[in-house]
């Protein structure tokens, strides 16, 4: 999980706003996961074959930030986290976007907007590929992903989560493009110089900033996908008006199932994204897909407020532990995630939904039967059980995202 200390700006407790120490001490979710182990699910040979013989794009995995905080060699089996080479091979995952995540607090007086950290995290992705060139390769284009797949390599394309390191400079944008960044999440948990954030009650720009609007145009010219996960609703609609290329929601789920949670997308937004030709990549985190989980977190938040404490305080840890004992953390299930995919398909069609798991980014809040990257055959089996065809499943696994990425490349070439 990302060790993040950003202030919580919305009702409830976004999982990505927990600090690692507080989460570990207060909730002991790893132990809880063991207690609520994944249910046994019968995975057919067909599901395994589809997973192994299809490009699987997961558009958001937080390996770089994870190993920056606690280094592990993900080219071999690891003790921690949700991703390593053996588990990726077992699950059939072969095109995970490495998230170059920058905490929102790095954009502040006296800070460098996360520029240095961004370069360090990109370096770490390159190091993974250089350490094991027989297993991994950095991918800069759709053709790279397709070529690596033929060679049996796992592609490592990169997306930047939080555009702060652009730091108001189109030259910086070009520099990060040259280093391999192929999408930028315009903002994160706080509004920045580009866009308002869905988590931040302060709406400095009433959507995108003047520079943010200019940035979207330049991203189109370069071939950097515009990622509208995390941004405010107003910023989303402004991005839709400006972009000449399809946009993505790299790791978002549906507000239909989590009413009032602006971080997720409502039906009107999904329709607008589909009209744009874009794709929503479903986040697996329990608090993104389950209202029961959000209610659990809201109840805990209310107890903190009543006690006048915050995460990390000894008293907060005691309150959280008592809360957990009274009502264990309600993990979502594979079926819950499938409900989100079903809804997008029924609303706008099969061509506009994909996978943005947020593995290594949501801690031990992952659903039963989707606990790490080895579980993609479970997802495929779940889709088969719901009557999805193999062609439809392949669109969800990568076809839709690759279509968008190729269109972004084509728009850049034309501009």
Image (cartoon, rainbow, N blue to C red):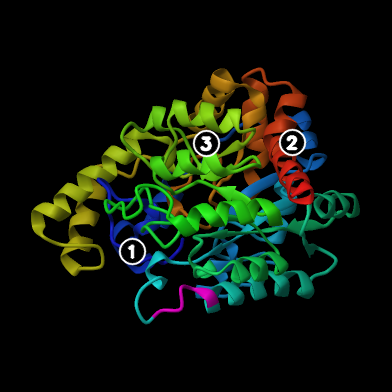
Q: Name the foreground residue: 294 vs 354.
A: 354
Query: Predominant secondary structure in magenta?
Result: loop
Q: Is residue 155 above or below residue 282?
A: below
The residue at the point 34 percent across, 33 percent down is: 291
Which badge, 1 or 3, comes first in the chain's sequence? 1
**Where's residue 229, x and y in %?**
49, 46
Q: Magenta residues, as a range?
A: 111-115
Q: SS of the residue at dot 2?
A: helix
Q: Residues within 10 Å of mark 2 (few under 14, many from 20)?
A: many
Q: Residues within 10 Å of mark 3 (few under 14, many from 20)?
A: few
Residue 399 - label: 2
**In the picture, residue 256 is in which quadrant?**
top left
Q: SS of the residue at dot 3?
A: loop
The residue labelled by disc 1 is 6
The residue labelled by disc 3 is 39
| Left-right relation of 273 to 187 | right
Report how far apart the C-alphas of labels 1 and 2 lie in the structure. 35 Å
Which badge, 1 or 2, comes first in the chain's sequence? 1
Report how far apart the C-alphas of labels 1 and 3 lie in the structure. 34 Å
């Amino acid at each position: 999980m990302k060790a993040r200390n950003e202030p919580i700006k919305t009702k409830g407790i976004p999982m990505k706003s927990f600090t690692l120490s507080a989460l570990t001490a207060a909730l002991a979710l790893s132990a809880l996961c063991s207690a609520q182990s994944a249910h046994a699910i019968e995975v057919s040979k067909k599901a395994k074959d589809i997973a192994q013989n299809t490009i699987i794009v997961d558009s958001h995995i937080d390996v770089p930030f994870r190993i920056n905080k606690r280094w592990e060699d993900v080219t071999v089996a690891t003790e921690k986290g949700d991703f390593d080479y053996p588990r990726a091979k077992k699950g059939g995952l072969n095109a995970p976007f490495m998230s170059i995540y920058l905490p929102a607090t790095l954009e502040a007086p006296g800070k460098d907007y996360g520029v240095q950290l961004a370069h360090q995290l990109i370096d770490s992705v390159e190091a993974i590929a250089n350490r094991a060139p027989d297993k991994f390769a950095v991918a800069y284009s759709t053709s790279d992903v397709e070529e690596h797949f033929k060679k049996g390599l796992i592609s490592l394309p990169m997306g930047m989560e939080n555009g702060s390191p652009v730091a108001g400079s189109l030259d910086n944008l070009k520099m990060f493009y040259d280093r391999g960044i192929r999408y930028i999440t315009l903002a994160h948990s706080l509004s920045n110089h580009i866009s308002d954030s869905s988590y931040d009650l302060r709406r400095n720009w009433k959507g995108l900033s003047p520079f943010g609007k200019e940035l979207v145009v330049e991203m189109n010219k370069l071939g950097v996908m515009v990622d509208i996960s995390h941004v405010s609703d107003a910023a989303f609609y402004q991005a839709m008006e400006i972009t000449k290329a399809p946009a993505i929601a790299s790791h978002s789920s549906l507000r239909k199932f989590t009413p009032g949670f602006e971080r997720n997308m409502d039906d009107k937004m999904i329709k607008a994204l589909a009209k744009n030709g874009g794709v929503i990549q479903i986040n697996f985190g329990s608090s993104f897909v389950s209202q029961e989980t959000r209610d659990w977190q809201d109840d805990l938040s209310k107890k903190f407020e009543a006690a006048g404490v915050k995460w990390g305080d000894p008293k907060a840890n005691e309150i959280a532990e008592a809360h957990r004992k009274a009502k264990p953390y309600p993990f979502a299930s594979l079926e819950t995630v499938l409900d989100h995919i079903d809804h997008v398909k029924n609303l706008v069609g099969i061509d506009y939904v994909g996978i943005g798991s947020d593995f290594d980014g949501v801690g031990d809040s992952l659903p039963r039967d989707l606990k790490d990257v080895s579980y993609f055959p479970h997802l495929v089996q779940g889709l088969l059980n719901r009557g999805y065809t193999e062609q439809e499943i392949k669109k969800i696994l990568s076809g839709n995202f690759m279509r968008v990425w190729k269109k972004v490349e084509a728009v850049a070439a034309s501009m």
